[in-house]
Amino acid sequence: MEHLRYAIQSQLGRKMMTPSTLVETVSINYEDFSEHFLTCSTCLCTYDSQEHIPKLLSCSHSVCRSCLERIVAATGVRDAGSFRCPICRETIPLPRGGISALPPSFLVNQLLDLMSRQRREVVPRCSTHTTQELLFCESCDCVFCSACTEGTHDNGNGSYSHTVIPFSIAIKRMSEILLYKANLCIGKLNAAAENVHSEVGKLDQNVDHTFELINRTFQEVINIVEKRRQEVLGMVKKIRDEKKKVLLEQLAMIQGEKSKVEEECQGLQHQVEVRNITKKISDLNEKIDAVKNVMEPRENAFIKYEHLHNSAISDIEAALNVFGRVRTSKTFPTLCTADVHDTSAHLHSSSLLRTVDYHGSLQTVGGDPVVVELRYENGDEVEVQLLDQNDGTYSIKYTPDLPGIYKLYISIFGRPIKDSPYQFTSSEHINPIICFGSAGAGDENFLQAAAVAINKTGRVFVLDTGNSRIKVLGSSLEFIQHFHGDGLEERGGTGIAVTPSDSLLVINWRTRYATELNFDGMLISQFTHSDFVEPLSLVVNSKGEILIVDNRLKCVFVLDPSGKLLRRIELKRKGIRHSKYVSLIATGPQDEILIADSHIQVFSPGGEFLREIYPEGRNRGHFGGITYDKKGYILASRSDKNKHYIQVFNFISGQLLFCIDSADAKLKRPAGLAVDDQYNVVVVDLGNDCVKKYRYK
């Protein structure tokens, strides 16, 4: 910045023989001075000796001739008329000679002369039109003068919306940007240096702590472990030296880059060459981006001494060569990554953390101090399990209990890994992991499938009632074969179950026969009972007893494996809600009997009524299937108007825990369902003539 200085002299000391002179020197900022005293207050242009000649009005205000001529032309006055001062609005008489006859502002002209002598800044002129000042178009990023372009660039008031400023101002602005970028780069380099210095300090502290621990543990057996102690200390020193060497080399590189930036930025305020300034800005931008690579220390301060306590000196002496070890790590947190994906509420989910060194090479050992934290969108912390797989990877397990947004924070050595915290969404929907089938009679088709059962090996048996067959599927719902014939006549099969003796039981409501088949579809036995009227569903309890529910009679028949009636449980009783349509039956953990229609009734194995479970209040919906998963949950498929889902209840409390539905392929009239040992539920989707497999825990 340039400053003007002026002196005010006054006579002092009248009683003195010789006069004294007081000289007061005032420093004035050039830009502020130029803006307030050398700029026309109307058009904000700097006064000059051509177009913007300063004119002094009778009200003592100065206005440039160009502005006064526009004001007079706009008011329509002629010679000897008057106009108003654009600053104070006082009426100013117009002389006969017009605006040109107004007196010049001598003070402004003197200041302009003074400024021209004092100002060291050179106004760039066009090499072709030497009287024209150079301009700079920010829109086109080019330098020109008004005569060169013949008016094709303007300040945005014409047809061309370009941002045009004086070239001298552009130089100043670009110099300021250059200095700003340089300072920013230096600031980042300083921050990087501080980080590395801090890591060096932590490394030294950890080494000191490790030394102390080593000395303390070895002191007890110093006479026999002195040699080993020196070896261990040497290992620590070697690791420290290696780490420190890397960090100090990084510091030296940072300091070198810093010195280069400071050297390149010297004298930038006097630089007027646009290309040079633009290139330097570009170079600094690249250097700023490159600084990111040195922001993190290329080594870490992690060093840890471990030992196993021995019960006696003799044990220590025998194990001296393997006593104590120093743990360290090459892991570079900034490059470590984790696989984190969106999940569904209530499902067990996991993420895999992979650790790498500074060069991006995968680590092959574990032991890093990994800290993991999972938080729900309201800030609540969610339980997380971290498993070190001792191969450079870490398994992170968690179960989001609520739908919403979660953040997973992962750090190593107290520094976050790449992209941490990871944000993922837990959906309220649980989409099927496998979907199989469509309407028809082919190998991959169903027609009014009613029920499903799963054996111990995961094989799925679907009762395809409309096609009078059983479709056998693998654990991934791949087609295997069909069973036809016995027990499936007249499209009457409505219930299927797996027995403890590894066989299938099918109930046919038309023939009223229960048929036992092996897993290859071969007939084992058949039986019926004279009291059967409308047997719709069956289940086998842990004792091998067969429970068949009869919808017409509203009762449950309990039979032995040969079909002999053991007892009959009446469902229509005083004091309990009667079921209008009874077609679903399952057993609980202690062979409790579960009956479902619009609600769920629980009976003891002997038939004593225990309790009722009402999902979402007493509504008009109905269940299509029910089962107990042997892990404390009742799963029941349900339809309520246009809503279809699988509900999961706590068996003891009857509390509805959550519902399973899907956002992309919704259930439509879900019916029978069965659960395997892997927290998978297979449900028959009557509305879509298919079966779907869901993971629910």
Image (spheres, rainbow, N blue to C red):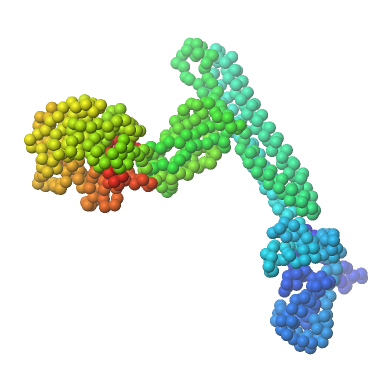
Q: Residue 540: image x %, image y %?
A: 19, 32
Q: Residue 318: image x %, image y %?
A: 50, 11
Q: Which quadrant is the C terminus positioned in?
A: top left
Q: Residue 575: image x %, image y %?
A: 11, 47
Relative placement, left or right, of 478 versus 203 is left
Residue 502 seen in the figure: yes
Viewer-proximal residue, 343 or 11?
343
493 above or below 237?
below
* Residue 569, quarter of picture: top left
Residue pushed farthest right?
Answer: 17
Viewer-proximal residue, 29 or 497?
497
Relative placement, left or right, of 140 versus 105 is left
The residue under the point 15% across, 39% down is: 509
189 above or below 331?
below
Q: How many marks?
A: 0
Residue 560 seen in the figure: no
The residue under the point 63% across, 36% down is: 196
Residue pushed farthest left?
Answer: 530
Q: Which quadrant is the N terminus positioned in?
A: bottom right
* Residue 596, quarter of picture: top left
540 above or below 166?
above
The residue under the point 27% across, 32% down is: 482
The residue under the point 42% across, 48% down is: 378
Q: Residue 498: image x %, image y %?
A: 23, 31
